[in-house]
Amino acid sequence: MKHISILAALWLLALGAASQMPADTVAYHTDSAPTPYDVASCGSTTWGIRLPAELIPQHRQLHEVQFYAGDSGDYRLTVYTGHQPDHVVYSEYYTFDTAGWQTIAFDYSIPVYDTAPLWITLSSSGICTPTHLSTYCGNPDGSWLFDGTDWHSDATLGSWLLRVIFTEAEKVSLTLRVVNGYCGYATGGGLYYPGDTATIEAIPSERNCQFVSWSDGSTDNPYSFVIESDLVISAHFEEASGIDDIVTDGLTYALRGLDLEIDNPQRHPVLLHDITGRRLAAADTDALRVTLPAAGIYILHVPGFPARRIVATR
C-alpha cells in the first residue's frame, strides 16, 4: 500500500488524525470527543464530506468507509463525483444493530479519479442522532448536509466522524487485435489504471495496405481515449484498393491518403464514381492522377470487367 501525496499527508497531520489511521485514509476530524448531532424531526437525514480533487490519491480505488453511527438502524451510502454531488458511482443500503464506529467494505473495485471532487454521503431515516460530529471545526468540506433541496455546509458544526480509505487500483487490460493481420499491426495495448488515457496506433506493414477503422467505429490514427475497464479493440486493415490493386490486364492503381494513382498502359476506358454514383473521372489515358474529395468508398470501373471498391480513410 502506497502513501497518499505529501500535500494530503501534511493536511491530515494538521487535523491531528493522520498518525492514528492507516495510509491512504482521508478524514477531516479528530475523534477524541464525539458530539451527537440531533435531528429534531427524526425524519430522513443526509450528510457527508467532500474530498477535493487534490486530496484524492492517484490511481486508487475505494476500499472502505468508516463512520460513527449515533444509533442502530438503516443507512444508505452513496458516492458521487463531480463539482456538485450529481454523478452517482455507488449506492447501497446497510443495516447496523449497534451504535458506534461502523465499517462498510466494498466487495468490488470502485475506481476514483483525481480530476474532480469525490463526495461520500450517508442517509438515514427515523434516526434522531444519525451520526456524530467531532470537535474539529473550520473546514467546510467536512460538514455537508442535504436539506431535501440543496446541499450546504456549515463549518461551525464540526466535522462528521467519517473516514474514507483507499487502496491501489487494479489495472485493466487493453487488448489489441488486427483484422487482415498480413496488412499491418497495432501498438499501445497493455495494462492501464482506470481513468488513464490510452493511445493506440495502427501501422500498415505493406505498401498497398491501409488502415480503415477501429472496431468501435473511430478512424483516428493514432487514437487516444480514457480507459475505465477491460477492453478489446481491433484495427481493421485493407489492401489499398479495398479488394485488389489489379483491375484488369495491365491496369493497376495505388492509393496514398486521398491521392489515387492509376497506371493504364493499355489505355482502357476508366470510370471513377463515388458511392452515390457521381462521376469523378473518366479517361482512357495511360496514367490518371485523382485527388479524392474526402474519406469514403469509391468505385473504379472498366467496362467489361468487375468493378473494384476503393476505401479511402484520409
Image (cartoon, rainbow, N blue to C red):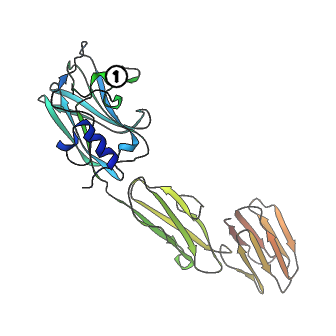
Position in image of residue 102 (x %, y %): 17, 35
Q: Quadrant of the C terminus?
A: bottom right
Q: Nearer the viewer, residue 53 or 298?
A: 53
Depth order, front residue of 3/45? 3
Q: Residue 163: name its quadrant.
A: top left
| Residue that label 1 marks | 154
Q: Residue 84 in the image: x percent, y percent?
A: 43, 32
> How many C-alpha atoms fall within 10 Å of the one at disc 1: few (<14), some, or many (≥20)?
some
- Of 265 and 106, nearer the camera is 106
In which quadrant of the rendered view does residue 306 lie? bottom right
Residue at 77% from the left image edge and 66% from the top image edge: 292
How far across and how far down the image is residue 162, in percent? 24, 34
Relative vertical location of residue 86 with respect to residue 54 in this rendering, above or below: above
Identity of the amino acid at label 1?
Asp
- Element marked by disc 1: loop
State the image coordinates of residue 293 (x, y, percent, origin top left). Answer: 77, 62
Side (left or right) of 291 relative to 8: right
Examine the rendering and report whether any part of residue 110 can be seen.
no
Q: Residue at x 58, y 71 (%)?
A: 237
* Relative vertical location of residue 304 with respect to residue 155 in this rendering, above or below: below
**Quarter occupied by the N terminus:** bottom left
Residue 226 appears in the rendering: yes
Is residue 74 left or right of 194 when viewed as pictured? left
Q: Residue at x 44, y 35 (%)?
A: 83
Left or right of 2 in this view: 183: right
Q: Nearer the viewer, residue 188 or 255?
A: 188
Corner quadrant of residue 290: bottom right
